[in-house]
Image (cartoon, rainbow, N blue to C red):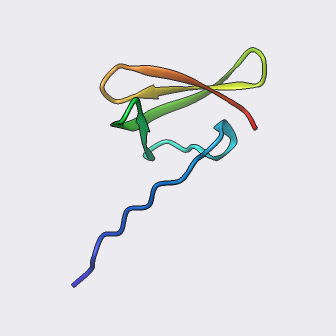
Amino acid sequence: MTQEVAHTVTVTGDHVRRGDVNSAGGIPHAVADVREVGGQRKLLQFEDGNAYALPRA
């Protein structure tokens, strides 16, 4: 039997990938898309329609 393990880590935009689950404001969100936007930032588009911009590093 496989056991699922979850860890809480702090990430930057360079390390987020489509399919990751990230917490914004204490609420978990599944990442649907990651795009680079001005200022070396990454825009995370979540499956629930919310979006969040992260610094690249």
The part of the image, by quadrant, that contains residue 23 is top left
Q: Is residue 45 left or right of residue 36?
A: left
Q: Position of residue 29 (x, y in %)?
A: 36, 36
In the picture, which quadrant includes the C terminus?
A: top right
Q: Can you tell which quarter of the image residue 31 is in? A: top left
Q: Is residue 51 left or right of residue 34?
A: left
Instruction: Tell me residue 37's x, y (percent).
Output: 69, 18
The residue sitting at the left extreme is 1
Going 40% across and 29% down the picture, which residue do you hit? 25
Kindly indicate the quadrant of the structure image that contains residue 28: top left
- Marker count (numbered): 0
Residue 55: image location, x then y, percent: 69, 29
Question: Residue 2, percent across and down?
Answer: 27, 80
- Residue 47 vertical placement versus 51 (above, below): below
Residue occupying image coordinates x 78% and y 17%: 39
Q: Residue furthest bottom?
A: 1
Task: Name, please, the residue furthest toward the front.
Answer: 26
For image coordinates 69% across by 42% down, the residue present is 14
- Residue that appears at 36% across and 35% down: 26
Nearer the observer, 43 or 11: 11
User: Is 13 on the left-hand or right-hand side of 1?
Assistant: right
- Is 42 above or below relative to 2? above
Q: Is residue 12 above or below residue 38?
A: below
Quadrant of the rendering where the N terminus is positioned: bottom left
Which residue occupies the foreground of this view, 44 or 22? 22
